[in-house]
Image (cartoon, coloured by chain):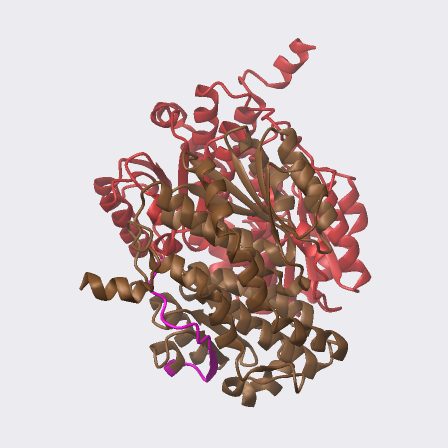
Chain colours: A red, B brown
């Protein structure tokens, strides 16, 4: 039995590490046949018939739990930016119990790796009763959510065994990006040139992820410094705010270190009081339109003696001079940055947890698929 | 100079404690002339002219930072429940930097105690440029936000000196409740009978808060148990989820304990991994439609040896049997529960911080009014 598990792990010590490394190919699988750099097109067969509804949508409600909720948060930024459709992201558990406002012309988008998440399924039923169009983004083919929804897109990330979701997250974000691009382009709110640039850049993501994964041993070294930490903060802005939330959740889930994600600018409204020399602060700080602002957030943390570990764009010398550690990642388009930035966060969590002796693939108290309410 | 401060503190050791205790009268000041149990009416002069716009609003965007953002989250539940208007609550800092979707028929509601919060002011300017109707809920009369907005409601909580907001929060929630009631009643989505019940109950809130404050010394005793804690979780559902966020923020701000708030049902998607015998878990668990669910969340925490401190409705024996400590508060209507439930959380934070020797009124790294970006 153990031998089979060893074979399934394909030489990796844990499923989680295998799944982090699989992201070079899983993202490729997610976009295969859907993003065509040759024809300069995005095609999503599963939702092709509802594209007109999406183009005319008054609003989109995205529903999920845990990591899927974070993917939904990235989706909010994407749909608002590309398609100018207001998006509300809801915790499935809160949505279903609160007598939510749902209109017949709403699009409800449910995200779940397993397709079996109980709260998300219940939320879908509510949305259907209210007459909304319900779409799904799931990984497990033929699971309950795809059967309950009107249409949807599979993430095709392959089986995810590690309880802490990694490749499923990047696959969910990839699907959301493709959807938002397609809807924005059809609606005319995403310029053709920008649409084509996104399509072109998509095909480079696997190699860019591979380049980040080459830093694996450096990240392992760096992680040693934080194995005694009891707390951590994760900061990001814009598209990278949800990545900060997801980075914190990974650390929390598998290392049992109390990590919390925040939009960087909110720090001064409370969390900055926590910062002292014992507090590692992980910052997603690649070059984008919030760059100057995140630089000053890093200065604020340093002024309070916090320990800053920043994910930066290759060649960034400004943050390198201020932060305690930087992890460089390849340059990409702002809207695609979540797909790269999250990878070092996944590796940091993995190594901190392993070095703390935690059971990474089966963390205490957690189940892979939460089928109870 | 110190003597003047002593006089200003009115016999209390800190402004924060004084302001917590003032909530019996500040809530009264907030509703005075606005909620009339005699005429069974709510009247808000500052927004009277825009009530028709609110009644017909396609959506409401609420914008704030820190505690004001939490008040806005309560507002989301209130407006959706009473007036069936979709509400999106935004961090001002994220909103302003992200090219937000704003329609001319949107109502943007900005919340700020000081009326000077830089990010919120910048967000208001964006909303005005987009042609939206912008309303303000502020405490400081004549401050910048009331001058920049089309209409608004003052909270009339009196000067708040303590950096950690207490009476300003309950005043903000009170204003949001009155607004949502009024709009819902005019729109016909809030039944007359329910509207009158809410009006009647409003007049009992000051005495109910006084009853909670009588437990001051018990709460001080209880707080002694947690002065060595390095972490804490705060849980709530529905209307009380934002109260959990606010409870956690208070502890974070003044005691420097890393506290985090969560919707209780999300716990199983990650944070439950953190729970062990060292983790105090503060739960807002008064009797409402989520009661059975929160009881099972408490059981989950106890099964992982977490330490549960629950705010419960007077006479609750079920949770009293499971939790390590319960703090009973008077029964009220579900939608008004945030106004009572937050008070014990404020006192817990205050006493834990004082007993840890922290400078409660001027916590490290924090400013009362964040006028920088």
Instruction: From the top left corner, tell me how far across and down residue A172 is, in percent.
Output: 60, 45
Q: Depth check: give the residue in front, B162 or A334.
A: B162
Question: In the figure, residue B238 lies in which quadrant?
Answer: bottom right
Instruction: From the top left corner, tell me how far across and down residue B212 is, in percent.
Output: 55, 57
| Residue B124 visible to an observer of this rendering | yes
Image quarter in which the C terminus of chain B is found: bottom left
B298 on left or right of B114: right
A360 on left or right of A210: right
Q: Depth check: give the residue in front, A95 or B42.
A: B42
Instruction: From the top left corner, tell me how far across and down residue A153 is, in percent.
Output: 69, 48
A67 on left or right of B164: right
Outermost residue, bottom direction? B49
Give the overall secondary structure of the magenta segment: loop
Segment colored magenta: B147-164
| Residue A240 visible to an observer of this rendering | no
Q: Residue at x 56, y 82 (%)?
A: B34
Q: Residue at x 38, y 58 (%)?
A: B16
Instruction: Report if residue B153 lies within the magenta region.
Output: yes
A66 on left or right of A97: left
Instruction: Report if residue B106 lies within the magenta region.
Output: no
From the viewer's perspective, is residue B98 above or below residue A340? Answer: below
From the viewer's perspective, is residue B99 above or below residue B253? Answer: below
From the viewer's perspective, is residue B99 above or below residue B33? Answer: above
Question: In the figure, residue A57 lies in which quadrant?
Answer: bottom right
Q: Depth check: give the residue in front, B10 or A226.
A: B10
Q: Residue at x 59, y 68 (%)?
A: B205
Question: In the figure, residue A269 lies in which quadrant?
Answer: bottom left
Outermost residue, left direction? B1
From the viewer's perspective, is residue A322 above or below residue A135? Answer: above
Image quarter in which the N terminus of chain B is found: bottom left
Q: Depth check: give the residue in front, A207 or B157.
A: B157
Instruction: From the top left corner, tell me how far across and down residue A5 is, in percent.
Output: 65, 15
């Amino acid at each position: 039995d153990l031998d089979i598990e060893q074979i399934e792990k394909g030489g990796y010590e844990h499923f989680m590490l295998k799944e982090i490394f699989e992201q070079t190919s899983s993202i490729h699988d997610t976009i295969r046949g859907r993003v065509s750099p040759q024809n300069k097109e995005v095609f999503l067969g599963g939702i092709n018939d509802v594209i007109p509804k999406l183009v005319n949508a008054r609003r989109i409600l995205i529903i999920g739990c845990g990591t899927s909720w974070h993917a939904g948060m990235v989706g909010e930024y994407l749909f608002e930016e590309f398609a100018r459709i207001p998006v509300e992201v809801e915790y499935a558990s809160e949505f279903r119990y609160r007598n939510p406002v749902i209109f017949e012309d709403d699009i409800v988008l449910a995200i779940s790796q397993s397709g079996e998440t109980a709260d998300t399924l219940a939320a879908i039923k509510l949305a259907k009763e209210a007459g909304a169009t319900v779409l799904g983004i799931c990984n497990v083919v033929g699971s309950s959510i795809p059967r309950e929804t009107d249409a949807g897109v599979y993430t095709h990330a392959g089986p995810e065994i590690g309880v802490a979701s990694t490749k499923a997250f990047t696959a969910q974000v990839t699907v959301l990006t493709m959807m938002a691009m397609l809807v924005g382009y059809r609606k005319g709110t995403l310029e053709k040139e920008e649409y084509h640039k996104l399509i072109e850049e998509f095909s480079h993501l696997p190699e860019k992820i591979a380049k980040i994964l080459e830093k694996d041993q450096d990240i392992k070294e760096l992680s040693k410094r934080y194995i005694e930490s009891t707390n951590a903060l994760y900061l990001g802005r814009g598209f990278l705010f949800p990545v900060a939330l997801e980075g914190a959740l990974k650390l929390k889930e598998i290392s049992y270190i109390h990590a919390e994600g925040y939009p960087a600018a909110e720090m001064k409204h409370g969390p900055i009081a926590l910062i002292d020399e014992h507090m590692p602060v992980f910052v997603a700080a690649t070059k984008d339109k919030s760059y100057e602002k995140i630089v000053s957030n890093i200065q604020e943390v340093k002024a309070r003696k916090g320990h800053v570990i920043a994910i930066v764009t290759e060649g960034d010398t400004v943050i390198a001079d201020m932060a305690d550690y930087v992890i460089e990642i390849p340059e990409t388009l702002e809207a695609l940055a979540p797909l790269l930035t999250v990878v070092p966060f996944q590796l940091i969590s993995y190594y901190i947890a392993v070095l703390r002796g935690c059971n990474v693939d089966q963390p205490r108290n957690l189940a892979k698929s939460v089928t109870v309410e």
